[in-house]
Structure formats: C-alpha cells, structure tokens
C-alpha cells in the first residue's frame, strides 16, 4: 500500500470563504503545487461536486469529502480545512444542501483499495465530540496528530510487509 | 433455491464511498447467510446492469427511474440512520 501524504501543509484552519468552489479550488491548488495531484484535479473535483455532491450531515457539524477519479492523482493524500463560517454543500445523494464546517479533501490513487482508511475516516465523522474538537483547534500540528492517531497512520508506516 | 440477488453499489467516481458501502453490505449478507452477487460500480455504469440487477444501493443521486429499487446509502458514511438503511436493504434482499 502506498504511503498516505498528510501533514501540516495540507491543513487549513478557520478559512473564510464564500463558496464551495472557492474552498475546493484553494485546497486543490495547494495539492497541485505539491505535485500530489495533477493539474486537472482541481476542475475535476469542482465538476464532480456539482454532479455528485459530497456533503454529509453528521450528528453535529456537517462535513464534505470532495474527491474525484484516481487518474487525476499522483500520490495518495488528504487535505483538511476548517471553516470559520459554514458554507453550503449539496448533500450526498440528495437534493438538499447542508452547512459544512469541515472539509476532508481526498486524493486516492487506487480504486477500491482504501477500505480501512475510509472506514477510519467515517469513524471520525461519527464522533461528534471529535469533529467539534478539530473544528475549534487552531494548531495545525494538533489537528495533524488527532487525525494521524485516528487513521492509524503511524502504525501503517511501521507495517513494512504491507 | 432462488437465484442470487444482484446488488449494485455505486458512487459518482467509484473510488471512495462505494467501497465503504460495499463492505458493509458484504458483512450484512454474511451475518444473514445471504449469497449476493455484489457489483461495485460507478453510477454511470448502472445502465449496463439494467436487466440483471435486483437492487441499487448508492451514495450518488439518481434522477433516473429503474425497474429495481434504489436505496440511499449515505447513512453508512455518517452513521445516522444506518440501522434503518440496513433493514431497508435486507427487506429487499429477502423478498
């Protein structure tokens, strides 16, 4: 399994933006600059979000998981943003919108093979207390450590035989 | 014995969400001793299974009408209402 790229430079806190396109562009272009994704990734995510919304109302604050096809990705990575003011995203599989405060942008490099990573991510979405802790946190390293622990990334690095 | 039910699991780009849903349904089938023909596909590919599928479980919005039931799988991702969704799916599978 390839290494997941995730660190402070992929975390944005208390962003103040007016639209989901603006947020997606901001996060995606950062990943393009780091060559984690290809140039076309940004537009592909924006287009996909229009067609298949990724907003997820949770027990507390809503999250969104913008992503796109593996062909736009160089290296598996995750970028996270917390928003100062909620921004409306379409609800996944629905006509509704939901005010999103936390964005997990996913750049996956293989189809169907990141089950355990995704399940751990979903476990974060189901933990209301954790979501609000992340949302209120200003320190990127603290957020990084929380996510790394929850995603078991440190253990993954140690699994040399995988 | 009736034929295995064909269940389509689909999301927009076929990478992220459907993997989680696919696994949840696999586990559910095991728990209930159901043999399923589970297909993880992109929502755009549903048309190819129009004649063979018994159920579509999806995180993507479908405006199209199909001859088989469609169940929204968002609850598998958020945990909210997941028991109801599982029951809905199970009801369709043991019909």
Image (cartoon, rainbow, N blue to C red):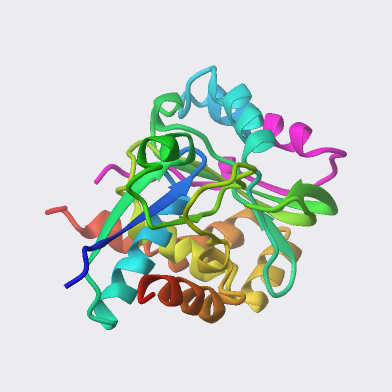
**Magenta-span inclusion, residue B21:** no
Q: Position of residue A15 (x, y in %)?
A: 79, 45
Quadrant the C terminus of chain B occupies: bottom left
From where the camera sits, is residue A47 visible? yes
Task: Give the vertical position of A90 relative to A147 (above or below).
Answer: above
Task: Give the vertical position of B10 relative to B28 (above or below).
Answer: above
From where the camera sits, is residue A14 visible? no
Choose between A75 and A11: the one closer to the eye: A75
Q: Residue at x 23, y 63 (%)?
A: B4
Q: Residue furthest top?
A: A39
Q: Residue at x 37, y 35 (%)?
A: B48
Q: Residue at x 29, y 73 (%)?
A: B29
| Residues drawn in magenta | A1-26
Q: Residue at x 69, y 53 (%)?
A: A94
Task: Give the vertical position of A54 relative to B82 (above or below).
Answer: above
**Is residue B48 left or right of A28 when viewed as pictured?**
left
Q: Position of residue B94 (x, y in %)?
A: 35, 76
Choose between B68 and A97: the one closer to the eye: B68
**Is residue B12 left or right of A162 when viewed as pictured?**
right
Q: Position of residue A119 (x, y in %)?
A: 42, 64
- Answer with the quarter of the image where residue A43 lies: top right
Q: Position of residue B69 (x, y in %)?
A: 51, 59
Quadrant the N terminus of chain B occupies: bottom left
- Answer with the quarter of the image where residue A67 lies: top right
């Amino acid at each position: 399994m390839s290494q997941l790229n995730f660190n402070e430079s992929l975390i944005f806190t208390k962003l103040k933006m007016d639209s989901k396109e603006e947020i997606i562009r901001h996060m995606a272009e950062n990943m393009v600059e780091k060559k984690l994704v290809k140039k076309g990734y940004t537009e592909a995510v924006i287009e996909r979000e229009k067609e298949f919304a990724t907003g997820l109302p949770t027990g507390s604050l809503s999250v969104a998981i913008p992503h796109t096809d593996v062909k736009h990705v160089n290296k598996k990575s995750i970028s996270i943003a917390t928003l100062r003011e909620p921004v409306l995203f379409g609800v996944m599989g629905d006509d509704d919108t939901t005010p999103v405060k936390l964005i997990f942008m996913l750049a996956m490099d293989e189809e169907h093979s990141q089950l355990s990573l995704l399940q751990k991510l979903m476990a974060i979405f189901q933990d209301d207390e954790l979501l609000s802790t992340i949302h209120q946190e200003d320190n990127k390293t603290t957020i990084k450590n929380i996510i790394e622990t929850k995603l078991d990334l440190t253990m993954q690095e140690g699994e040399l035989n995988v | 014995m009736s034929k295995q039910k064909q269940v389509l699991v689909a999301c927009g780009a076929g990478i992220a969400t459907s993997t989680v849903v696919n696994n949840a349904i696999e586990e559910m089938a095991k728990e209930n001793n159901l043999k399923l023909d589970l297909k993880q596909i992109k929502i755009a590919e549903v048309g190819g299974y129009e004649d063979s599928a018994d159920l579509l479980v999806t995180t993507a919005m479908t405006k199209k009408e199909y001859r088989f039931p469609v169940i929204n799988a968002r609850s598998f991702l958020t945990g909210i209402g997941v028991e109801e969704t599982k029951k809905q799916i199970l009801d369709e599978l043991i019909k």
